[in-house]
């Protein structure tokens, strides 16, 4: 019995490592290609580099960060510190439900609301807002757990010294600092790797220039991978592999940081 | 001369439908140590938490009756933060804030708007000395408070309370999470600060109540069974229930 479990777990471990390893090593060698990080793709993405996709993904992350983290944080604080118990439970299950909505549905929602109704078109801002709609409940679900884990005694201890509710809340945030940072990284990681929501709201397969306004469309890493694999020939596939490799490396860095923060939560 | 600090009149308290305090009447005098004792679940923590209105934060809590602080009904107080600076509280489990030893003690002063460095340093040192912790932490003021031992953390919490110069310090079983040596240190400390402050301590340990308190309030199942000078209650308990508690038959 023990050996069966051991063999299963080793197999799983080896399989996962192989998958990650293959993805990384099938593309990582292109990173040293001259101009890979600094040039535009050329000749139907068979030449050149990934500069606009990199910048596009980065811009998306910046807007998502600016929109969803303050909103998510205020929402979380309301849920754990201020809302009456029933409302708090309701809102938290609402956030959990929103997390299980397929991402393409968010995409279609963003398409109809931001792109069409609000006339923002296929653009950086539509894509960021769509991603944020998804990121906010994701952040809340994760962050609320960390705030709830702060012992009641700490809140009461602050209040008992003559502090007001706001000061008590700040102390709770301070006590859950590492947890909140974890939630932040996981949320941005999720938004970074999502493809479907931006595919229909803001990403284009090819643009000759970087977005100049937030209402311009962008190229991003995940949507470009999709575009290359679906539409282009053998000569362009290397670029998809290189970008996949880069994305996996970014995600591994994010999750390693998260693990590090978890281990140091109490310090 | 002691004066009356708290007057508790016809106090009833409920959590939801569960009655925890049943018509409690008592007076608490200034200075010295008043112990609220009784078996667990008798409502002693609830009574203590009523005194600085900490129960207000619990949604299912409700109470009837009057608690007066120097003659003023505390439930008519608008500025609760100001009141809690006068009547502060130390909890069962040490709850140091996630910051340095110094910042913990300075916290209550900083939220009052005191920012002058020298003043803060003097007040922190004074509070730590009163809490008999200064010698142990004077080289560790910048260290995170969570690195202190349990007993040191609890004395730090007392120092933190002393720093805001309250009039009354409420303590909710402050030694129940500590070992006997740390407990003795806290008891000595409470005796020394009781010359200057009104100390009200909840304890389920009869021994502790007898060792340190001047007056005692004995609660059983939410009712006040007996209260008065500790020495008299111990020598001649007027009530059978108290006698049983003192002899260890209930508790």
Image (spheres, grey):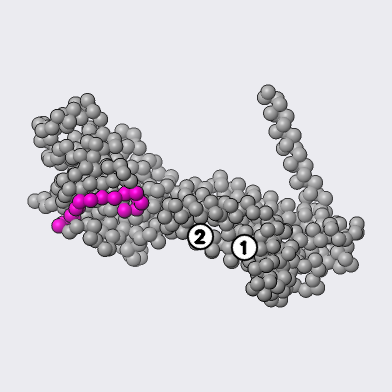
Magenta stretch, residue numbers: B56-71
Decide if residue B163 is on the left or right side of residue B145: left
**In the image, residue B235 above or below residue B57:** above
- Residue B70 inside the magenta-drawn segment: yes
Q: Quadrant of residue B207?
A: top left
Q: Residue at x 50, y 61 (%)?
A: A74
Q: Earlier in the sequence, mark 1 or mark 2?
A: 2
For disc 1, the neighbor class at 10 Å (few under 14, some 14 to 19, many from 20) is many
Chain of the residue that carries numbered disc 2 in the rendered image: A
Mark yes or no: residue A38 visible: no
Question: Residue A196, image x and y in percent?
Answer: 72, 59
How far apart in space, not on screen, are marks 1 and 2 (Cα)? 13 Å
- Which numbered marker is on residue A75? 2
Decide if residue B143 is on the left or right side of residue B235: right
Assign the C terminus of chain B to one quadrant of the image: top left
Asked if badge 1 and badge 2 are on a common chain, one would say yes
**In the image, residue B49 above or below residue B246:** below
Chain of the residue that carries numbered disc 1 in the rendered image: A
Give the SS element for disc 1: helix
Question: Residue B25, image x and y in percent?
Answer: 16, 45
Residue lying farthest top? A1
Q: Nearer the viewer, residue B12 or A14?
A: B12
From the image, tell me which residue sits under label 1.
A132
Give the SS element for disc 2: helix
């Amino acid at each position: 019995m023990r050996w069966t479990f051991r063999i299963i777990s080793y197999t799983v471990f080896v399989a996962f490592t192989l998958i990650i390893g293959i993805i990384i090593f099938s593309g990582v060698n292109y990173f040293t290609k001259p101009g890979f990080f600094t040039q535009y793709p050329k000749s139907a993405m068979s030449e050149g580099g990934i500069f606009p996709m990199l910048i596009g993904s980065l811009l998306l992350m910046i807007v998502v960060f600016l929109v969803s983290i303050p909103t998510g944080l205020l929402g979380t604080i309301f849920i754990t510190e201020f809302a009456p118990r029933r409302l708090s439970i309701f809102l938290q299950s609402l956030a959990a439900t929103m997390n299980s909505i397929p991402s393409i549905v968010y995409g279609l929602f963003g398409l109809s609301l931001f792109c069409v109704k609000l006339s923002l078109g296929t653009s950086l801002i539509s894509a960021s807002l769509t991603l944020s709609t998804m990121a906010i409940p994701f952040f809340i679900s994760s962050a609320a757990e960390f705030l709830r884990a702060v012992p009641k005694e700490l809140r009461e201890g602050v209040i008992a010294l003559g502090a007001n509710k706001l000061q008590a809340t700040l102390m709770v945030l301070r006590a859950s600092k590492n947890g909140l940072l974890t939630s932040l990284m996981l949320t941005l990681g999720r938004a970074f790797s999502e493809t479907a929501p931006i595919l229909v709201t803001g990403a284009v397969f090819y643009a000759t220039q970087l977005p100049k306004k937030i209402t311009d469309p962008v190229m991003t890493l995940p949507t470009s991978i999709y575009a290359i694999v679906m539409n282009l020939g053998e000569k362009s596939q290397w670029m998809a592999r290189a970008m996949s490799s880069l994305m996996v490396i970014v995600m591994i860095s994010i999750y390693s940081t998260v693990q590090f923060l978890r281990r140091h939560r109490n310090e | 001369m002691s004066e009356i600090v708290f007057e508790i009149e016809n106090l009833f308290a409920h959590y939801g439908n569960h009655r925890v305090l049943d018509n409690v009447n008592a007076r608490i005098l200034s200075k010295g140590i008043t112990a609220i004792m009784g078996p667990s679940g008798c409502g002693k923590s609830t009574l203590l938490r009523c005194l600085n209105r900490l129960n207000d934060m619990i949604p299912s809590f409700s109470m009837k009756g009057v608690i007066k602080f120097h003659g003023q009904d505390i439930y008519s107080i608008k500025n609760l933060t100001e009141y809690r600076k006068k009547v502060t509280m130390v909890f069962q489990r040490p709850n140091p804030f996630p910051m340095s030893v110094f910042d913990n003690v300075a916290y209550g002063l900083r939220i009052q708007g005191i920012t002058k460095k020298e003043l803060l340093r003097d007040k922190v040192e004074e509070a730590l000395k009163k809490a008999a912790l200064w010698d142990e932490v004077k080289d560790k003021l910048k260290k995170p408070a969570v690195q202190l031992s349990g007993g040191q953390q609890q004395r730090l919490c007392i120092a933190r309370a002393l720093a805001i110069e309250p009039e009354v310090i409420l303590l909710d079983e402050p030694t129940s999470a500590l070992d006997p040596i740390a407990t003795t240190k806290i008891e000595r400390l409470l005796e020394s600060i009781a010359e200057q402050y009104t100390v009200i301590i909840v304890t389920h340990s009869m021994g502790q109540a007898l060792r340190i308190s001047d007056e005692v309030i004995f609660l059983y199942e939410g009712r006040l069974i007996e209260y008065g000078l500790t020495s008299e209650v111990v020598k001649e308990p007027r009530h059978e229930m108290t006698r049983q508690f003192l002899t260890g038959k209930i508790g």
